[in-house]
Image: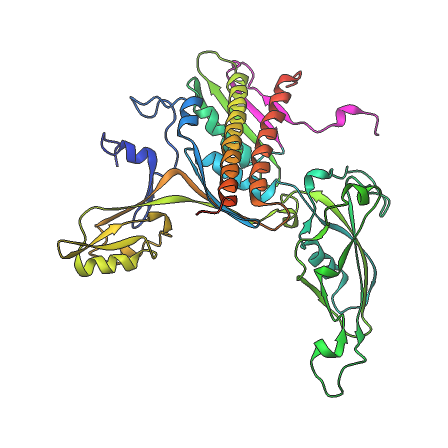
Amino acid sequence: SMAVESEKKPVLEMVQADGADEGCVTFVLHDEDHTLGNSLRYMIMKTVDVDFCGYTITHPSESKINFRIQTRGGIPATEPLRRGLNELSDVCQHVLNTFQARVEEFKERQEQPME
Amino acid sequence: MAATMSNVEEIRTRVILGEYDIKNVHTSDYPGNYPGYDDTWDMRKFQKNFRVDLVHLNESSMEFDMVGIDAAIANAFRRILLAEVPTMAIEKVFIYNNTSIVQDEVLAQRLGLVPIKADPRLFEYRSPGDESAEEEGSEIDTIQLQLKIKCSRNPRASKDSADPRELYLNHMVYSSDIKWVPIGNQADVFADSVIGPVHDDILIAQLRPGHELDIVMHCVKGLGQDHAKFSPVATASYRLLPEITLLEPVEGEMAERLKRCFSRGVIDIQDVDGRKVAKVVNSRLDTCSREFLRHDDLKNVVKLGRLRDHFIFTVESTGILPPDVLVTEAIKVLMVKCQRFLSELDSPELE
């Protein structure tokens, strides 16, 4: 039973209603909760061509979220998702750099006793 | 309240604490909500407005301000600090002998909660799979600890003493009695770092003469999501910066009462032309108890609010990692989550 490789757990699924265009998609993100859900929702809501963005935790016993994006103007929904993830990653990078710089400054200031 | 020109700024930036409700709680500055405002995400505008101010930092706790970020992301950092920064903790307890009055499972649970000082970044997770007891665990994913202690009567105690400290030897089992047993090449890799419990004075069990503990423990890497023993913070929390506005000048006896309504140091009484006038000097110290709402004459004089994008974080570490390292790791965890889904999106996608 160890030979079948397709037994690996899904990470991200896309659910699309039949007949709807590519702009209205519900993504199922596995092993995620409000931590990524809310912060990603915020980043995607700040995009102009997103009509609707929201997420739900379908059941508290299951760690997966339904993340829905509806776009305007025929843009495929994966685009704001990708952009939101990239921007969130960039925000984290900037926060990290700023924080580490402040910690360095603080530690240097502590080492120099004030005269 | 309708969004007129004058209070749009207030709705966008402040949370108002009223007598019976709290207003403007949710973030509303999304593109299209406010005519005349361009609320689209702009990385440069964010970088210009964002700042971090460190107030206090030592090996066990830190307090810092994060200004210019939204609650969704600040909360994500807080949640990751509590539940998704990995640490090492005792997971498997092999009890070879326990003749104390503490039951096996109670003892094992107490041992699990003892913080273990080992840098979790130098260890791997144990791969899940069918492993038989004691065979799993190699040097890269396990730390082995031992607790071997026996309580005996003190032969040198005086005849009529009633003090257990004098009568018995080893009658209190502290976390200092937990010893590290290096496996594999750990003795060389961790030659200059001491691996063991963070604190020496955690009381684990009490013994009397004849009781013995002979226990071997395996520590593994885990997340706070799985069990609270893996959480690296004593707690991590944030609060928003309070903002106290006096709508009218408050003088004399009213000023004294107003000063007592807030935390110490928030309101100062100053002498202006012989009259005592109240002035807000440091609203950061206030705990927003809203005591002023209990006084009818002070109710309408003060406006209490919070700045929506100014977060005062307090991170207390359990001692495993210093608090600034914890915050750094938490930010990296969020980045890794984003990268994981980005690579999933880029790989051939199935519906």
Q: Tell me: B86 left or right of A92.
A: right
Residue A57 in view of the camera: no
Tell whether B78 sits left or right of B104.
Answer: left
Question: In the image shown, does A94 or B21 lie closer to the viewer?
Answer: A94
Magenta-colored stretch includes residue A15: yes
Q: Position of residue B26 (x, y in %)?
A: 39, 36
* Residue drawn at (52%, 19%) of the image: A83
Q: Is residue A30 visible?
A: yes
Q: Nearer the viewer, residue B50 or B37?
A: B50
Q: Is residue B175 magenta?
A: no
Quadrant containing the C terminus of chain B in the rendered view: top right
Q: Residue lying furthest top in this view?
A: A74
Range of residues picked out in magenta = A1-30
The quarter of the image holding the N terminus of chain B is top left
Residue that extends furthest to the front in the rendered view of this protein = A115
Q: Is residue B125 above or below residue B273?
A: above
How many numbered markers are drawn? 0
Residue at x 72% of width, y 60% of height: B176
Q: Residue at x 52, y 42 (%)?
A: A107
Left/right placement of residue B61 relative to residue B158 reads left
Give the image location of residue B267, x and y in percent.
Answer: 28, 53
Quarter of the view holding residue B23: top left
